[in-house]
Image: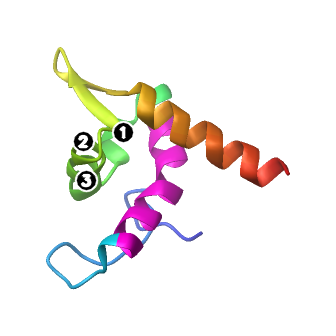
Amino acid sequence: MSRDARGSPEGPKRGTAEAPADRKERLRLALPLAAELLRTRQAGLIAAGDIDDFVELNWLEWHGGSLRLTVTGSNVCSQLALARRG
């Protein structure tokens, strides 16, 4: 998976036509990288549009002015990790 200059996986620019299923799959695949950036306190490297989309999907949430992974987001990351192993 390639990344843009800010460290986010490349995807269609906001405002372009993207099927909802394609958008969700792109975000699902990008979530582990976003979670790692949050863990290492590099949230500024996550594209703002992706943050909005992750929050809309309830995979990330704002908490006291900072972002954190939700239980749902953590489950999505776990599912991806299991799929990659087996």
In this rendering, is residue 36 above or below 29? above
| Viewer-proximal residue among 67 and 21 | 21
Residue 40 in sight in this render:
no
Please state the extent of the stretch shown in magenta in the rendering. 21-37
Q: Are marks 3 and 2 in contact (CB under 8 Å)?
A: yes
Q: Which mark is residue 59?
A: 1
Q: Residue furthest bottom?
A: 17
- Residue 8 in percent (x, y) is at 42, 59
Does the residue at mark 1 contact the one at mark 2 (Cβ under 8 Å)?
yes
Q: Earlier in the sequence, mark 3 or mark 1?
A: 3
Question: What's the amino acid at mark 2?
Answer: Val
Q: What residue is at 40 percent from the left and 35 percent from the top? A: 42
- Say left or right for 52 vs 73: left
Judged from this view, the residue extending furthest toward the right is 86
Residue 55 is labelled as: 2
Q: Residue at x 73, y 52 (%)?
A: 83
Per the model, the C-alpha gap separating discs 3 and 1 is 9 Å
Task: Give the residue at mark 3.
Answer: 53
On-image quarter of the N terminus: bottom right
Name the element at disc 2.
Answer: helix
Q: Amino acid at mark 1?
A: Trp
